[in-house]
Image: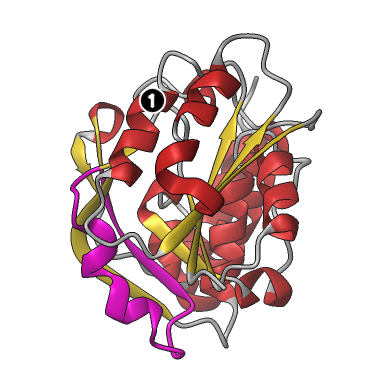
Amino acid sequence: MSLLTVIIPTYNAAATLHRALTSLQTQTSQYFSIIIQDGNSTDHTLEIAESFSPFFKERLTIFSEPDNGIYDAMNIAIEKSKGDWFYFLGADDYVYNTNVFEIIGDDLQNENIHFLYGNVYSPDYGLRYDGKFSFEKILNRNICHQAIFYRRQLFEQVGNYNITYKVSADWDFNIRCFSHQEVRTKYVDILVAFFAPGGFGKQVKDAPFIKEQKRLELEYIKKNKPLLFLSLMVKRSVSKLLPK
């Protein structure tokens, strides 16, 4: 059984997939397997994926079938994996340095860690993003999944990705992890991956998730910052009285 499974959801990713796979090919630690979960690409994605088979051999598995978006593809791949840990890499991203998997190797052996994360390098987020997170911080900004290693049991504890959130299912999942009392997180101050700019989440707003995020944020403020909560309620009351 492979300790770590790298899952790459793809759809017409021929322009970028080679770089993503090369960043895995050059890792100093090769104690991982790869699942490419493709959504029936019509370009050369599958040919590029197959070109890496001679190197990875049985450690690379390629599936191509219809799905309902990136998070559905990730859920499907989870069910097919036998790994203890998951790492989700976008087809247009790449692992930042050749020794990333070697650096985090000991932590993956630690049974007291369920959610291991570092940073990404991204032009969209001011280059290095974004340090250690608390529950309050993650209510306001997400940890990129390209920076995170998830233990399999997390998906048994908090459930899979909620595919009703088309662009924010990973943020929703991370919030559920941080709010779960039995989930142990650890931050490692390294750059894990290059996170490509201009992703789908930057182009489309996930209105159902935004509504839930605001509800959770208000609930947190009510519980932990009562004076701020009271101030917000007063402002809301006053705004309702003002003429439109």
**Residue sitting at 81 percent across and 28 percent down?**
66
The residue lying toward the viewer, choosing from 49 and 145, is 49
The residue lying toward the viewer, choosing from 64 and 199, is 64
Image position of 233 with respect to 203: above or below: below
Magenta stretch contains residue 137 = no
Which residue range is magenta in the image?
96-120
Callout 1: few (<14), some (14-19), or many (20+) C-alpha neighbours within 10 Å? some
Image position of 53 with respect to 130: above or below: above
What residue is disc 1 on? 18
Q: Amino acid at mark 1?
A: His
Q: Quadrant of the C terminus?
A: top right
Q: Is residue 11 left or right of residue 4?
A: right
Q: How far from the left and from the top, in percent, is residue 162?
A: 74, 50
Q: Tell me, yes or no, if residue 111 can be seen here.
A: yes
Image position of 65 with respect to 77: above or below: above
Q: Is residue 218 left or right of residue 143?
A: right
Q: How far from the left and from the top, in percent, is residue 3?
A: 48, 72
**Residue sitting at 45 percent across and 38 percent down?**
54
Q: How far from the left and from the top, in percent, is residue 186?
A: 34, 76
Which quadrant of the figure has residue 39? top right
Q: Is residue 26 left or right of residue 38?
A: left
Q: Which residue of the protein is positioned furthest toward the front in this rendering?
A: 54
Q: How far from the left and from the top, in percent, is residue 85?
A: 51, 68
The residue lying toward the viewer, choosing from 87 and 127, is 87
**Residue sitting at 44 percent across and 47 percent down?**
56
Identify the element where label 1 is drawn. Answer: helix
